[in-house]
Image: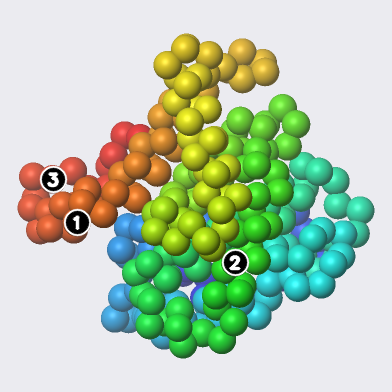
Amino acid sequence: MELLKYFEPFKHIDTRAMLSYVEAMEEVVEALDERLIPDAKTYTLEDLGSYVKSLVAAQRRKLSFVKPGCWCVVSGDDGMPGDARVDFVFRPTYAAVATLSRTLCDYPVLAVRTPRFLPTLKQVMKFATYRGLAGHGYEADQGAIHALRILSLGKVPLLLQQHPELCPSLARIIREVAQSMQDRLATHSAVGIWGEDLSEGFRQAIETMRLVNDPEFMRSISEARQDRSVIPRKDWTW
């Protein structure tokens, strides 16, 4: 499977293709976390740099149907309903901020060489606060699980811990969402509106945030990569 190397919004609405495109943006974040990219051949550091530059160039900077600072996977967003905004505006925006954050944390020279990188990162962090990471309507909790996990894979919590001045409000929201999940797990109230059990999703999101954003833990994972007895990240059960 070829990973996304350039961001370009759709000119016409095709919901199935647009959802696949959002998933492709998230797959880049997953691949960065698993250290599958950049590599020497299929997705080089230059490829990552080009993708990051395309993200920076495509960020919405003018007021339209949505506020500036986001990424929308379709050019025309007028009248987009709330559930579609989560899928086609907020999810790609979380994936974009995760990609930029991970790039800054792991490949700072690449970030420095990208014009407008820092103002773009600050603006997208602000936009990421607008829903409090929640999904739409009845899927508010599921949306929060997904958003917290993607942001964590992008090392956004770690970056904000080290540089809270980038976006104090997003740092606060991430802490509050994670704490709320932890509290609901502790009180056995991790249940959705329809009675569905959310405990596994809450645990996955919290553990991802803690483990990926703990430098000592990740250093031990890196050192153990050559140890065949260590369970690979892709086989973790959370």
Circle 2 residues within 10 Å: few <14, some 14–19, many ≥20 = some
Return the mark for residue 230.
3
Query: Alpha-carbon distance for marks 3 and 1?
Result: 14 Å
Quick one: label 1 or label 2, which is nearer the N terminus? 2
Identify residue type, mark 3: Val
Residue that numbered label 2 is attached to: 122
| Relative to 11, residue 177 above or below | above
**Does residue 28 appear to the left or right of 65 in the view shown?**
left
Q: Which mark is residue 219?
A: 1
Secondary structure type for disc 2: helix
Q: CA distance from mark 1 to mark 2?
A: 27 Å
Closer to the camera in the image, 198 or 9:
198
Given residues 162 and 198, the one toward you in this image is: 162
Examine the rendered structure and indicate whether residue 174 appears above or below residue 222: above
Residue type marked 2: Lys
Q: Nearer the viewer, mark 2 or mark 3?
A: 2
Q: Nearer the viewer, residue 227 or 183?
A: 183
Q: Position of residue 226 (x, y in %)?
A: 10, 58
